[in-house]
């Protein structure tokens, strides 16, 4: 292993340990020493990579989010129709958080209340992902799939807000055990509200990508059952 790869592996080791500690304890109560013990390293080694505990916290979502955005773009290349893409995005977010509860705890329960995080590179990467959702909604408007009076920003906030509420409730209460069950209902709710009823074509997604390592290093296929089509309403 080269020196650079060894350094990157060590840094990833520290970040995973910090993620676990910060998810279990209040950030202000957690210590670098606890992170070091979890990682099997010394305090001094932690400080070789991160000068402060806050820098360590802010570094957790940076590469994870970047890899997630790259994977998302890969999925969307195989999908036609803005409605189907919205379903893919919702499914992807829920799947990722369910497979990474410690990461979800850090992002949803710790970082969201930290104003300094808004100034970090990691947050800019997250914003790039949000812009991707916006572009999909705008694509649907331009193609006539969604109503021309659709507010892309409001729809995006509805998507993110519902996901956030579900994930936070799941983290705090442990219910439901499978948050992926909400992927279809959320999509139905969003699409039903913005679909252009003058269009006869509904949305129907049935896709299966070959299993690949997800951004956590776990082989996970993307699958979705066939979706019901939305028929246009008849004018009275």
Image: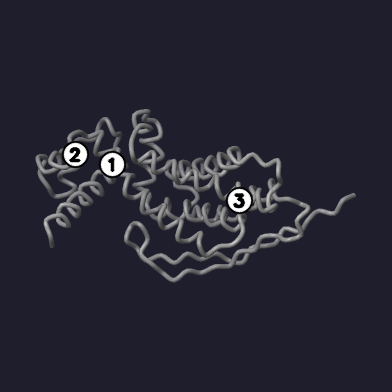
| Residue at figure coordinates x 68%, y 46% from the top left | 194
Q: Nearer the viewer, residue 124 or 38?
A: 124
Could you tell me how far apart the alpha carbons at marks 2 and 3 are, in whole angstroms?
41 Å
| Residue at figure coordinates x 90%, y 49% from the top left | 236
| Residue at figure coordinates x 34%, y 47% from the top left | 102
Task: Locate residue 34 relative to residue 119 in the image: left or right.
Answer: left
Q: Residues within 10 Å of mark 1 (few under 14, many from 20)?
A: some
Dot 1: element: helix
Q: Position of residue 170 (x, y in %)?
A: 46, 46
Q: Position of residue 85 (x, y in %)?
A: 56, 56
Could you tell me how far apart the alpha carbons at marks 1 and 3 are, in whole angstroms?
33 Å
Task: Locate residue 99 relative to residue 182 in the image: left or right.
Answer: left
Disc with the residue nearer the chain's start (2 vs 3): 2
When the figure is inspected, residue 12 is found, relative to residue 51, above or below; the finding is below
Residue 139 is labelled as: 3
Q: Residues within 10 Å of mark 2 (few under 14, many from 20)?
A: some
Q: Which residue is mark 2?
A: 50
Task: Locate residue 151 relative to residue 108 in the image: left or right.
Answer: right
Q: Which residue is mark 1?
A: 59
Q: Quadrant of residue 107?
A: top left
On-image quarter of the N terminus: bottom left
Q: Nearer the viewer, residue 62 or 93?
A: 62
Disc with the residue nearer the chain's start (1 vs 3): 1
Camera-near label (1 vs 3) is 3
Task: Locate residue 21 relative to residue 144 in the image: left or right.
Answer: left
Q: Residues within 10 Å of mark 3 (few under 14, many from 20)?
A: some
Dot 2: element: loop
Dot 3: element: helix
Q: Quadrant of residue 84?
A: bottom right
Residue 227 is labelled as: none
Q: Position of residue 94 (x, y in %)?
A: 48, 52
- Taking the view exactly as shown, the residue that stands out farthest to the right is 236
């Amino acid at each position: 292993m080269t020196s650079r790869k060894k350094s990157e592996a060590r840094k990833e080791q520290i970040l995973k340990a910090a993620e676990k500690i910060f998810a279990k304890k209040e950030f202000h109560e957690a210590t670098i020493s606890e992170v070091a013990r979890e990682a099997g390293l010394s305090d001094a080694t932690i400080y070789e990579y991160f000068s402060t505990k806050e820098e360590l916290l802010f570094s957790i979502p940076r590469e994870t989010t970047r890899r997630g955005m790259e994977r998302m773009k890969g999925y969307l290349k195989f999908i036609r129709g803005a409605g189907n893409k919205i379903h893919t995005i919702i499914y992807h977010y829920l799947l990722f958080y369910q497979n990474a509860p410690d990461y979800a705890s850090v992002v949803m329960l710790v970082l969201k209340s930290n104003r300094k995080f808004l100034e970090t590179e990691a947050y800019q990467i997250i914003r790039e992902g949000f812009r991707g959702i916006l572009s999909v909604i705008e694509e649907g408007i331009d193609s006539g799939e969604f109503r021309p009076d659709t507010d892309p920003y409001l729809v995006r906030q509805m998507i993110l807000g519902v996901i956030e509420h579900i994930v936070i409730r799941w983290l705090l209460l442990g219910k439901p055990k499978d948050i992926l069950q909400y992927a279809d209902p959320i999509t139905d709710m969003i699409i039903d509200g913005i679909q252009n009823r003058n269009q006869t074509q509904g949305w129907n997604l049935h896709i299966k990508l070959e299993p690949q390592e997800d951004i956590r290093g776990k082989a996970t296929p993307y699958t979705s059952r066939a979706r019901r089509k939305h028929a246009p309403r008849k004018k009275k």
